[in-house]
Amino acid sequence: MKKSVGKKDEPVYRHKISAISDAIMLMKRHTFPYLNYAHKSPFTIVPIPPSKTLHHPLHDDRMWQIAQNSVAGYEHNAVPLLTLTQDRSPSHENGQRPKPKALKQLLTLETGLFPELHPTLVLIDDAITNGTHFVACKDLILEALPEKTIIGVFLARTFRD
């Protein structure tokens, strides 16, 4: 899933496309039934932004693809609520884990999308190591929208030595 979009024209990129399809299926078959049971009302899927801004040539929208395609056919919705304001090095490449406070300063909320949000927001990301990205995103959202319930869904757990 973490193959760079710079490899889009290489045969190996098909594995990324397959992993995105698998993640969509996982969300629909396993995550949504649980969330439907636990919350009994529609929710909004919000992807945690990648390390590159929207206009960067290596911007990877894999989590947006997963969010958007997962909700197809459901009363839930997907909203790109969070935006990265400055490119940064991916944490999994450089081994440096920013603190939530520092990461939060690089994020902004798309306030024009607030009316589209359901009471429960499900932040999704491809992996969780120590929760920094989730905490930064959750804290930023709750500062502006304290009435929201926020849940994190992660497709994988990273273990460090």
Image (tube, rainbow, N blue to C red):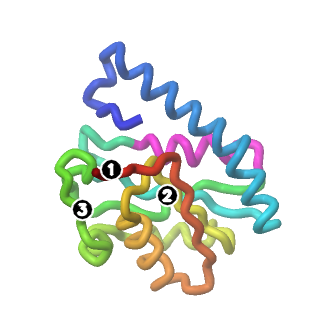
Q: Specify the amino acid type for callout 2.
A: Pro
Residue designated by label 3: 97
State the image coordinates of residue 70 (x, y, percent, origin top left): 64, 44
The Cα atoms of the two marked residues, 2 and 3, are separated by 23 Å
* Magenta-span inclusion, residue 63: yes
List x then y, in percent, for residue 106: 27, 68
Q: Does label 2 or label 3 sit earlier along the sequence?
A: 2
> Residue 12 falls in which quadrant of the image?
top left
Q: Earlier in the sequence, mark 2 or mark 1?
A: 1
Give whichever of discs 3 and 1 has the lower sequence position.
1
Q: Which mark is residue 80?
A: 2
Residue at point 33% right, 32% down?
3
Q: Which residue is mark 1?
A: 54
**Which amino acid lies under the numbered mark 1 shown in the image of this protein?**
Leu
Q: Nearer the viewer, residue 38 or 58?
A: 38
Q: Which residues are magenta?
A: 61-74
Disc 3 element: loop
